[in-house]
Structure formats: structure tokens, C-alpha cells
Amino acid sequence: MGFHDFMTCRVSSLGTLLSAEESFSLPPVSDHLPQAFRVVWETGHAVEILSWNVMARGRAGATGRAGTALEGKRLTNNGLDCDETPDSYKQRLKERVLPVLQRWLEQSGTCQRVACLQEFPVQPLLQQEFLSDLRSKIPCLQMAVGSAWEVESMDLPNACVLQLVVEAGFAQLATHTNAVVWDSSLCERPSQVPRGPEVLQLALKSTKHTFDLMSFHLPFKDSPGGARYSEGVKAATSFLRTLSRDTPRPLIAAGDFNVQVNDLEKAFGATAMATQHDSAVFRGQRLSVDACVALPGLEEPSTSLMPLVEDSGGLWRPSELELFGPEGRDAFIEKYAASQLGVSGCHTQNDRHILEYWEIVAKNLHDDPRLWRLSDTAVASLGCWPFAEQPREVARLLHGTRSQKKRKLDNPLLTAYASESEEDSTEDSQ
């Protein structure tokens, strides 16, 4: 796609950081290519953006259950039919994804660079470890992550979803989120513009420029040609239109539309948008679903900014309630639930919400004494893994604590357990 003018900004594609062979060959890096873009404002100020869906933990191999719309179909959550264990997923992030991002950020030169990541891990420890590894070579980096919570099967406005997640906590853990990485010279204290769970939008203020930056990942409806594909195009078009009329400051939005970008151009018309053709793959079909969009803003003050909470070492989260919700650690472990509870300002039938009970930590661990030796961050991360894998995760986390000396506890994955003594306990082998 060429170089497009759009009022006060222009956006162009700078190509990909990996070839298709490097990224898609098994074992893969991701089912999306890392793509670089350049946005130039009318003032001459330029920002380079990396947009990359880093692929959530690969799950594949199951078959749709009888009596469902997916009966008999081979199920997967990624375009390469990749099935990963927790260990192989962590290894891919650390050894294949992180070095690509780190090299690009190191080569920034005089141009400011920002990375917008999609399908980023929701586990707080993985997030901390990822940023710590990035900062081992670039100490001034900061990272913001989207919420780990989502509300499913509820047709609510974004503001209501945010209220449910942050204030009431009536939600369940997501499988991935969005993230943004930037140099602190660009902005030291970001704010968030609430847009809903599929979007992470930050307000970045610096001495050179003030703009909003968004990493987005729209829901997948169907592959091109599928029965529900038009729903995805309609949703993505609506998303773009909402941005164009509700963007008070200049905005750079980069991410995964989950529909072909040329279909959006037909539906939405001209805009400052750039994409890299064949940037993703789904079961052998090459797709162009990732893009970077630049909008000039309405030059109106925003009244919806929300402060972010710094977790540790430059990692920013949407709320201090992110780890456990408003009920705290005990309720998180026992069960995180809501039933027939109404929320002010959110209207459904009879102005009431009926939500089921959701377990987060497996029942066989609720009374396990090992659980109480884990830090809050570790317990929150544990709840993000499937029940069947949680006992092994508990053992791995505790084993990692014992095997490290205190003088090496500079890695967040380890400092999360710094309060634990190094005593050998028979409980660890239970």
C-alpha cells in the first residue's frame, strides 16, 4: 500500500522484520509478521511503529463437539495449527519473539519508536519477565498492558464493560491482551483512554508531541469467504468510524483487524492507513489483516482519561484491582463470581445481569499449603493457566524460588517470591 495523505499526517509501511519463512516455519515465531510503519505529522515530527500480533499460546488438535456449530471440525486458536505446552510457549516468547522486538527498539536512532503488540500474555509474571529482559539492554523502556479480564456473552457498551471489570469485577480472565512498549523519553506517565477490552489506547505526552497510541485486536468472526466474514468487516468498519469521530487528539492505531484490509478500504473509503500485504497466515491462506492508521484528532479536550497504575519497573496496568479484582486474593482463589447482580448505568433485560460462577484456581489447589507461599503476582499468574496445568505451575514456581540465590533476585519472575524463605519443605513435593 502506498503513502497516503490525510489532513495533518501521513503513514507508510516500512516492511517486515522477519520473512514469512522465518516466522511461519515450524516451530513458528508467530502466525503474523512483525511490521514497521512510519507516521509523519504536518509539523515534520515522525514516529515509527512496530505492530505485531505475537500469537497467544497455541492450542490445536481438538475436534468440535457433537450438536454444536463446530461439530466435527478441527479446532485451533492460531493460523498454524500450533499446539504448545506452557513451557514451549514461554520459550517461544523469550527466545524467538523478544529478540526481534529488542533489536528493533535498539536501532531507533533519532526517530522515536513504539511497539504495539497484540495477543500478548495476560500472566503478570510473564509480563514482568518480558519487560525485564527488554530492559536488560534498553533500561529506559516502559510497557503498558491491557486488562486481563473480559466479560463474555454480554452485549454491553465499552464503558459498561470497563465498569464491570474495574469496579465490580464481574468478569473472567482473558487468554491474551494488548501491550504497548515505548522509551520513557517519549512519555514518563501515560494515561488510558477507555475503549473496551479489544483495545489499549494510551495518551502519551512529551515535550515534542502529544498524541494517542492504540494497540488493537478485533474479534475473529470468520475467514474470508466464510459465512460470518461479513460480520467481521462490518464490525471493523464500525470501529474505524467510531475512531474517526471520537478522537480528540492525534491518534496512531496499529493492530489486527481480523479482516482483509482492502475490504475495509472499500467499505470505509480513503484514510491514512498502511498495511503489509500477506502479513498473516491461516491454514495455508495468506492474509492482509494488520494495519496502521493515523487520524489527526478533533482538537477537543478529552474528559475520559484514566490514570494507569505502575506495577513494577516501568510496567503499567489499567487498575490496582487488576491482579484479583475488588474482592482480593482469597476470593480469587476460592472462586470469582457474580450472580443476578445489577450494575448502575448498564442496562439489559430488567436492568439485571445474570452471571455464572467462574472458577479461576483449580479446586484441588484451594487448600494446598504451597499456594500460600506464592506472592500475589504469582497467584494471579497461576489463575491464567488451565486447571490441568496449574499443579505443575505451582511446583515449577516454588522450585524456581529454591534454586535461586537471593543475590540473583533481580528478575521480576524471581523477586515475586523474594519473601519466601529458602527452606526445604516436604510440602513442595506433595
Image (cartoon, rainbow, N blue to C red):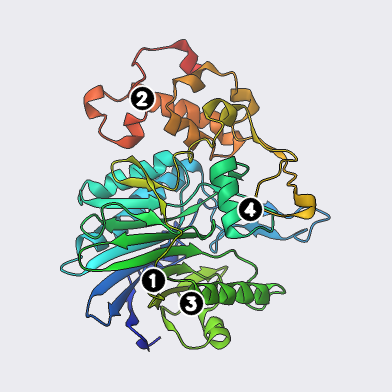
Residue at disc 2, secondary structure: helix
Mark whose residue sits in front, 4 or 1 = 1
Q: Residues within 10 Å of mark 1 (few under 14, many from 20)?
A: many
Residue receiving disc 1: 251
State which tag comes first along the sequence, 2 or 3.
3
Mark whose residue sits in front, 2 or 1 = 1
Residue 298 place in picture, x, y as percent: 41, 76
In the displayed structure, does residue 411 sit left or right of residue 89?
Answer: left
State which tag comes first along the sequence, 2 or 4.
4
State which tag comes first along the sequence, 4 or 3.
4
Q: Quadrant of the N terminus?
A: bottom left
Amino acid type, label 3: Ser
Can residue 86 be seen here? The reply is yes
Amino acid type, label 1: Leu
Amino acid type, label 2: Thr
Residue 140 place in picture, x, y as percent: 21, 51
Residue receiving disc 3: 244
Quarter of the rendering containing residue 413:
top left
Mark whose residue sits in front, 2 or 3 = 3
Gap in Å between the C-alphas at discs 2 and 3?
A: 49 Å
Residue receiving disc 4: 61
Residue receiving disc 2: 401
Gap in Å between the C-alphas at discs 4 and 3?
A: 41 Å
- Residue 42, compared with residue 299, is above or below; it is below
